[in-house]
C-alpha cells in the first residue's frame, strides 16, 4: 500500500533506567518499538511499515551518549552516540580514525546529528556504514536484557538483512572496541549513487598493522559492506596478505580474492557485476592507502 | 521617471513569506469542518474494472463517502484531448472509462472525517479486475495488430490530419531537399542510435489541495498548478457545469517544472466537495506523487548525418520514437518541439525527420522543463560532436560553419523570428570556457594528463541549443491582464491582476518589476492579485514553455498603457483589461512540416568540464559555463538562479536519475531509490554568461529563459566524458556503472526497452 504523509499517533516514553525498558518491553511485546535517533524508525512508521503503539526512547539511559577511552581497556561507545559525535571525538579521531571516517560518511550532516551507532548496527542493514569498521576493529556489542548484560562479538551479532541475535526484551547499550593494534592504519571507502545521502552500493573497511608473527611482517583485516546478507570478512585475502610482501601485486591479488568472496545482488541501485568489480577496486585502493600511512615495523630501515 | 526597474536584481516578492514559513502551500490550508480524502490507485497497469465494493470502506467509523466512476458526470479529462477517465470503473458516462491503463489511474476516492479513517477505508475498498495484456514497449505498441489501448479515442481526434488506427498518438514529419541524393555529397557520415531516459519532476511539494464551496457557491479548488484557467475548464467539463461555477486558486506552489501542467487530484477534489458540500483536503505522499503524475518522455533516436570535408552539413535523417505512456497529456506538443530541435540549431539543406509518439501502459509522459527539446538536442549535439571528431575539427569551429543566422532557412523551410544570436552565444560560451581564437580557427583548451592520479581523467565538451518560447504550432498564444489604478491626484496604488503561476521561478517578481516600469511607478506601489480565476477570469496561459515573462510582460504593458490613458482622462479608479496576442504561427504542413511553428526563441550554449574516475565510473563536474541569450534580463540574479537550477536538474537527468519500471510499474518510487542530485553533486562552479540580444517583440526585449539552461547540458557533458576517456556514451543516465561498462567495452549498445 502506498505511504501516507504524516505520522499516526503513538505513545512515547523516555526511559530513565534499563530496568524500565525491560519492563515496558515485557508489558507491550511486539507493540513496542525502541528508538534512538529515530532516523529509520520514524520514516518506517510514517510509511506504515511498522505500527507501534508505544515508542520507547533509549537515548536518555545512563551512559548511552557517552564515549569512554582508556589506553588499556580501549573504547566504549554508548549506543546512542550520534555519528557526528563519534566522528569528532578526540579519542576516536586519535585512536580509531577508521570509525570516525565511517561515521562521517553516513547520509548527510543533519542526519548525522540524529543517527546513532547503535541504531545503525541494530537495523542490521548490510550497507550500514559503521558495521565494516566494527568488524575489523573487533567490536563487541553490549546487550542488556532481563538477565543483565552480556557481550556479543560483532561477527556473531548479525543473522541476515534486518536480523540480529537480539531476543525480545533485549537491547544494545554500547559497543566496545579493544585497543587498536599498535601502529595500525585504517581506511573506509564507499560508493553511493550520489555524493551525499545515498546508502552504500559497496563499502570496504581495511585495517593494517605491523605484526612480527606474520610471514609478511603485516596483518590486514578486510570487511565488505553491501555485497552479502551481512558484512563479510575476507579470510582468503587476509591470509594472502599475511604471507606475501606488501605491494601493488599482492594488493591486486588480495582485491581479486575479496571480489571473489562477495555475493552481491542486483537491485534498483546497482548490478551485482558492478558491485563485485567495485569490491576489487575499493579493496585495492584501501590497501594502497593503508600501506601509504602504516608505520614500518620497529627496527626496519 | 525613476531609474529603470527592469534589469535590476530586486528581492523576490515571495522571499520573506517563504523563508519565514508564513507562505501557505496547498497542504497547509485548513477549513472548519474539513474532510480528508484518499485516492485509491489501480496499482496495476492494464485491467478492466468489473466492480467496486465499498461496503467495508463505508463501515469504517468516520468514512463519509466513497466516490466511484458512476459519480463523475462527464468521466473524462485531458489538456490536449480528454482521453483519461477521472475515476476508472463501471457505470461511467464515457465508453472505455472502465479500463485502467496505468498503475496510477484512480479507481475510487474515500472521504472521511480524518486522514487515517480515509486511508483505512481506501485499503478496504474491494475492486474486482479482469486483467488485460500489458503493452509497455512502444515499438511493440506500433506493430500492426497490436492491442489497442484507446479504441474509443482515435488519435485522429488529436491530429485531424493523422488517419492511422493503432496506438500511434502523434506523428510529425519534416521533409526538406532530397536526403537520399545528398549522401553522395557527404565526405563524412555519422550514424548512431541514442536513448534518452524518463525523469521524475521531484518537486519539493507533493500534490495537495483543498476544495470547498466558496461564498458565491462556486466549487473552489486551492491547489498547485500551472494554468488556473485551464484547470477550471477541465474541472467544469468533468462536473458538467459552466466554468463560472468553478474557481481555481493557486496558493504558494512548491515547484512544478511541467509536472503540474496536466492535472492530478484537481477534479477528484472538486467532485468530492461538490457532492458532499463540505471542504475536502487531499495530500499525496512522495510515493503517491512519484507514482501518480506524468514524467519526461523516454525517446529513441536513429540518426544519420552527413557533412562535407569543410564542415558544412549536407543532410540529416532522424527517426524518433517516444513513449507517450497511458494518456496523451502534452505528448503531441512535446514531440512538436522534438521535431523542431532534433536537427539542432543548424541550417541543413536536406532533412528527413519522422517523430512518433505511442500509447503504452507506462506512466503517462508529459511536460517537463525543456518540453521535448532536451531529448532532440541531445541527439543533434551528439551527432555534431561526433562529426567534429570525424572531421578533425574543433567543435566550436564546425558549429560556426552551420549555425542558423537571421536569414537562414530552418528545417521547417522558414527563418527564425526575433533575431538569431546562436553565433554570439556559442562564441561567448567558448571564450568563457577557455577556447582560444587562433589563426586556423577556434581551439579548445587542453586538459593535460596528470601522472600522479592516472585514474582521474579530465575533459571538456560543448553543446548549443535553441528552444521556442510559448505554445504554438498554430495555436494563438494569448495572455490576459488587468490593471487598476487608484488615487486622486497621484497614483497611490496600482493593482495587477494576472493568472500567472509563481512556481518558484520568480514570475511574480518579474511581473511586478515590468508593471512598475510600464506604469512609471516605484515597485512598492504595485500590488499583485494573482492566480485566482475569481479575480483573473481571463486566461494568462500556462507557466511553461519559458513563456510567462514574455507573455505577461506584453500583457502588462498593454494593460498599463490603457490604464494610464484612462487615468489621464480622469477616470478614478482607472481600470483596463488587455489581452496580448502573440504573433501568429502555423501548424506543421502534414507532408513537409514546413511553416512558422513558433513566434520566439531563446538561444543557449554550455561548456562542461568533467573529471572521470575511470576505475569507479564516478563523474565530478568541475565547471559549467552557460551563455544564455535571454533578450533582456528583467532580474539578473533570478536569471542566474534559473541557470544554476536548470543545470542542477539537467545534471540529475544526465548522470543520476533512473526511473526503474517493471511491467509498467515504477519501482523507484521514493527519493531513497530515485536519487536526485545533492548539493555535493552539482557542478563545483557555474559561470553564467547573460547575453542580451533583444527580441523586438518581447517586452523590453525579453525572450524567455526558464528551460534553456537545462537543454544543452547532457550532450556537452557526454562530449566532455569522451574528451576524457575516448568513449562515446549514447544512452543516459551516465551512471558510474554505465561508464565502467563503457570503458571496459561491455554494454555500450543503446538498448531498446
Image: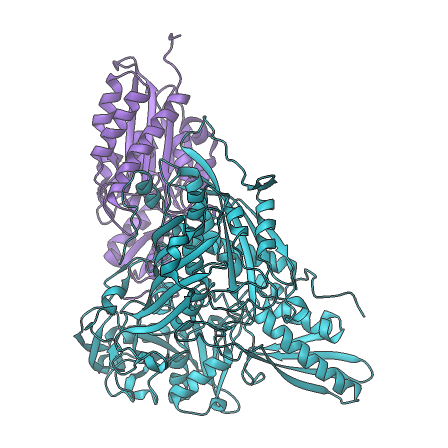
Q: Quadrant of the C terminus of chain A?
A: top left
Place of residue B659 in the rendered image (x, y in percent of width and height, measured from the top left): 33, 58
- Who's the residue at 53% across and 46% down the image? B397
Residue A114 seen in this snapshot: no
Relative to B533, residue B377 above or below: above
Residue closer to the observer: A112 or B316: B316
Place of residue A139 in the rendered image (x, y in percent of width and height, measured from the top left): 30, 32
Place of residue B626 in the rendered image (x, y in percent of width and height, measured from the top left): 56, 52
- Who's the residue at 23% across and 72% down the image? B46
Relative to B707, residue A219 above or below: above
Place of residue B23 in the rendered image (x, y in percent of width and height, measured from the top left): 56, 68
Residue closer to the observer: A190 or A174: A190
Query: Which quadrant holds residue B236?
Result: bottom left
Chain (purple): A
The furthest residue to the left: B130
Tell me the colour chain B is drawn in. cyan
Residue B168 seen in this snapshot: yes
Amino acid at each position: 500500500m502506498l505511504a501516507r504523509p504524516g505520522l499516526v499517533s503513538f505513545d512515547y516514553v523516555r526511559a530513565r533506567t534499563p530496568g524500565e525498558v525491560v519492563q515496558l518491553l515485557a508489558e507491550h511485546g511486539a507493540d513496542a518499538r525502541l528508538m534512538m535517533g529515530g532516523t529509520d524508525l520514524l520514516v518506517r512508521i510514517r510509511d506504515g511499515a511498522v505500527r507501534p503503539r508505544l515508542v520507547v526512547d533509549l537515548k536518555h539511559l545512563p551512559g548511552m551518549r557517552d564515549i569512554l577511552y582508556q589506553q588499556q581497556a580501549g573504547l566504549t561507545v554508548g549506543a546512542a552516540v550520534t555519528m557526528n559525535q563519534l566522528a569528532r571525538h578526540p579519542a576516536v579521531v586519535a585512536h580509531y580514525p577508521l570509525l570516525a571516517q565511517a561515521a562521517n560518511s553516513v547520509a548527510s550532516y543533519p542526519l548525522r546529528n540524529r543517527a546513532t551507532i547503535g541504531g545503525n548496527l541494530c537495523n542490521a542493514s548490510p550497507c550500514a556504514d559503521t558495521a565494516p569498521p566494527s568488524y575489523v576493529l573487533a567490536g563487541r556489542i553490549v546487550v542488556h536484557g532481563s538477565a543483565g548484560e552480556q557481550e556479543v562479538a560483532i561477527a556473531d551479532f548479525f543473522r541476515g538483512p534486518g536480523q540480529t541475535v537480539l531476543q525480545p526484551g533485549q537491547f544494545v547499550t554500547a559497543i566496545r572496541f579493544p585497543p587498536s593494534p599498535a601502529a595500525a592504519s585504517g581506511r573506509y571507502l564507499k560508493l553511493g549513487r550520489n555524493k551525499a545521502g545515498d546508502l552504500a552500493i559497496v563499502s570496504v573497511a581495511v585495517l593494517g598493522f605491523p605484526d612480527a608473527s606474520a610471514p609478511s611482517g603485516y596483518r590486514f583485516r578486510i570487511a565488505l559492506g553491501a555485497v552479502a546478507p551481512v558484512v563479510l570478512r575476507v579470510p582468503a585475502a587476509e591470509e594472502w596478505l599475511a604471507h606475501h610482501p606488501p605491494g601493488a601485486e599482492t594488493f591486486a591479488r588480495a582485491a581479486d580474492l575479496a571480489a571473489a568472496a562477495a555475493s552481491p545482488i542486483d537491485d534498483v541501485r546497482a548490478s551485482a557485476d558492478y558491485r563485485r568489480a567495485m569490491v576489487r577496486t575499493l579493496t585495492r585502493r584501501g590497501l594502497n592507502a593503508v600501506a601509504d600511512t602504516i608505520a614500518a615495523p620497529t627496527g626496519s630501515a | 521617471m525613476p531609474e529603470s526597474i527592469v534589469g535590476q536584481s530586486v528581492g523576490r516578492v515571495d522571499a520573506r513569506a517563504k523563508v519565514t514559513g508564513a507562505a501557505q502551500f496547498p497542504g497547509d490550508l485548513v477549513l472548519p469542518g474539513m474532510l480528508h480524502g484518499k485516492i485509491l490507485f489501480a496499482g496495476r497497469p492494464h485491467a478492466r474494472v468489473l466492480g467496486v465494493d465499498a461496503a467495508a470502506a463505508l463501515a469504517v467509523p468516520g468514512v463519509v463517502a466513497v466516490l466511484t466512476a458512476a459519480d463523475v458526470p462527464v468521466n473524462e479529462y485531458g489538456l490536449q484531448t480528454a482521453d483519461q477517465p477521472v475515476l476508472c470503473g463501471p457505470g461511467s458516462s464515457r465508453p472505455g472509462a472502465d479500463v485502467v491503463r496505468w498503475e496510477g489511474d484512480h479507481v475510487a476516492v474515500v472521504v472521511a472525517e480524518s486522514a487515517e479513517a480515509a486511508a483505512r477505508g481506501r485499503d478496504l475498498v474491494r475492486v474486482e479486475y479482469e486483467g488485460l495484456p500489458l503493452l509497455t514497449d512502444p515499438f511493440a505498441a506500433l506493430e500492426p495488430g497490436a492491442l489497442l489501448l484507446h479504441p474509443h479515442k482515435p488519435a485522429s481526434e488529436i491530429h485531424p490530419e493523422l488517419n492511422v488506427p493503432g496506438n500511434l498518438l502523434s506523428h510529425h514529419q519534416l521533409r526538406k531537399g532530397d536526403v537520399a541524393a545528398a549522401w553522395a555529397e557527404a565526405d563524412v557520415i555519422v550514424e548512431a542510435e541514442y536513448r534518452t531516459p524518463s525523469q521524475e519532476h521531484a518537486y519539493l511539494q507533493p500534490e495537495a489541495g483543498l476544495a470547498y464551496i466558496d461564498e458565491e457557491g462556486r466549487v473552489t479548488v486551492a491547489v498547485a498548478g500551472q494554468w488556473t484557467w485551464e484547470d477550471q475548464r477541465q474541472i467544469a467539463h468533468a462536473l458538467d457545469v459552466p466554468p463560472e461555477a468553478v474557481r481555481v486558486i493557486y496558493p504558494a506552489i512548491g515547484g512544478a517544472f511541467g509536472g503540474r501542467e496536466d492535472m492530478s487530484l484537481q477534479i477528484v477534489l472538486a467532485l468530492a466537495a461538490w457532492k458532499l458540500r463540505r471542504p475536502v483536503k487531499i495530500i499525496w505522499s512522495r510515493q503517491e506523487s512519484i507514482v501518480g503524475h506524468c514524467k519526461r518522455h523516454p525517446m529513441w533516436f536513429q540518426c544519420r548525418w552527413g557533412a562535407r570535408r569543410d564542415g558544412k552539413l549536407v543532410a540529416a535523417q532522424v527517426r524518433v520514437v517516444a513513449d507517450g505512456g497511458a494518456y496523451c497529456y502534452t505528448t503531441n506538443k512535446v514531440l512538436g518541439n522534438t521535431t523542431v530541435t532534433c536537427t539542432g540549431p543548424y541550417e541543413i539543406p536536406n532533412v528527413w525527420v519522422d517523430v512518433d509518439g505511442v500509447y503504452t501502459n507506462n506512466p503517462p509522459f508529459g511536460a517537463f522543463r525543456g518540453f521535448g527539446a532536451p531529448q532532440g538536442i541531445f541527439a543533434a549535439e551528439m551527432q555534431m560532436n561526433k562529426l567534429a571528431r570525424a572531421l578533425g575539427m574543433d567543435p566550436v569551429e564546425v558549429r560556426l560553419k552551420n549555425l542558423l543566422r537571421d536569414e537562414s532557412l530552418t528545417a521547417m523551410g522558414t527563418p527564425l523570428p526575433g533575431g538569431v544570436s546562436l553565433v554570439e552565444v556559442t562564441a561567448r560560451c567558448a571564450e568563457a570556457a577557455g577556447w582560444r581564437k587562433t589563426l586556423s580557427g577556434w581551439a579548445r583548451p587542453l586538459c593535460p594528463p596528470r601522472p600522479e592520479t592516472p585514474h582521474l581523467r579530465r575533459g571538456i565538451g560543448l553543446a548549443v541549443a535553441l528552444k521556442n518560447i510559448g505554445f504554438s504550432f498554430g495555436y494563438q498564444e494569448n495572455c490576459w491582464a488587468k490593471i487598476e489604478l487608484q488615487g486622486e491626484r497621484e497614483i497611490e496604488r496600482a493593482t495587477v491582476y494576472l493568472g500567472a503561476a509563481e512556481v518558484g521561478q520568480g514570475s511574480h517578481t518579474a511581473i511586478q518589476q515590468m508593471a512598475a516600469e510600464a506604469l512609471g511607478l516605484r515597485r512598492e506601489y504595485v500590488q499583485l492579485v494573482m492566480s485566482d480565476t475569481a479575480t483573473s477570469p481571463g486566461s494568462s496561459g500556462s507557466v511553461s514553455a519559458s513563456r510567462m515573462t514574455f507573455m505577461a510582460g506584453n500583457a502588462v504593458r498593454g494593460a498599463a498603457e490603457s490604464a494610464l490613458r484612462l487615468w489621464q482622462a480622469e477616470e478614478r479608479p482607472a481600470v483596463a483589461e488587455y489581452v496580448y496576442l502573440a504573433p501568429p504561427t502555423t501548424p506543421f504542413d502534414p507532408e513537409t512540416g514546413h511553416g512558422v511553428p513558433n513566434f520566439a526563441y531563446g538561444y543557449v550554449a554550455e561548456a562542461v568540464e568533467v573529471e572521470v574516475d575511470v576505475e569507479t565510473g564516478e563523474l565530478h563536474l568541475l565547471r559549467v559555463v552557460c551563455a544564455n541569450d535571454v533578450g533582456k534580463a528583467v532580474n539578473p540574479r533570478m536569471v542566474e538562479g534559473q541557470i544554476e537550477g536548470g543545470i542542477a536538474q539537467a545534471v540529475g537527468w544526465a548522470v543520476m536519475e533512473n526511473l526503474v519500471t517493471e511491467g509498467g510499474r515504477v519501482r523507484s518510487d521514493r527519493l531513497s531509490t530515485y536519487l536526485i542530485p545533492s548539493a555535493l553533486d552539482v557542478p563545483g562552479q557555474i559561470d553564467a554568461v547573460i547575453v542580451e540580444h533583444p527580441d523586438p517583440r518581447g517586452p523590453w526585449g525579453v525572450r524567455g529563459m526558464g528551460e534553456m539552461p537545462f537543454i544543452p547540458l547532457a550532450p556537452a557533458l557526454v562530449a566532455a566524458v569522451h574528451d576524457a576517456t575516448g568513449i562515446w556514451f549514447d544512452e543516459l543516465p551516465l551512471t558510474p556503472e554505465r561508464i565502467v561498462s563503457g570503458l571496459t567495452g561491455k554494454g555500450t549498445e543503446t538498448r531498446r526497452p
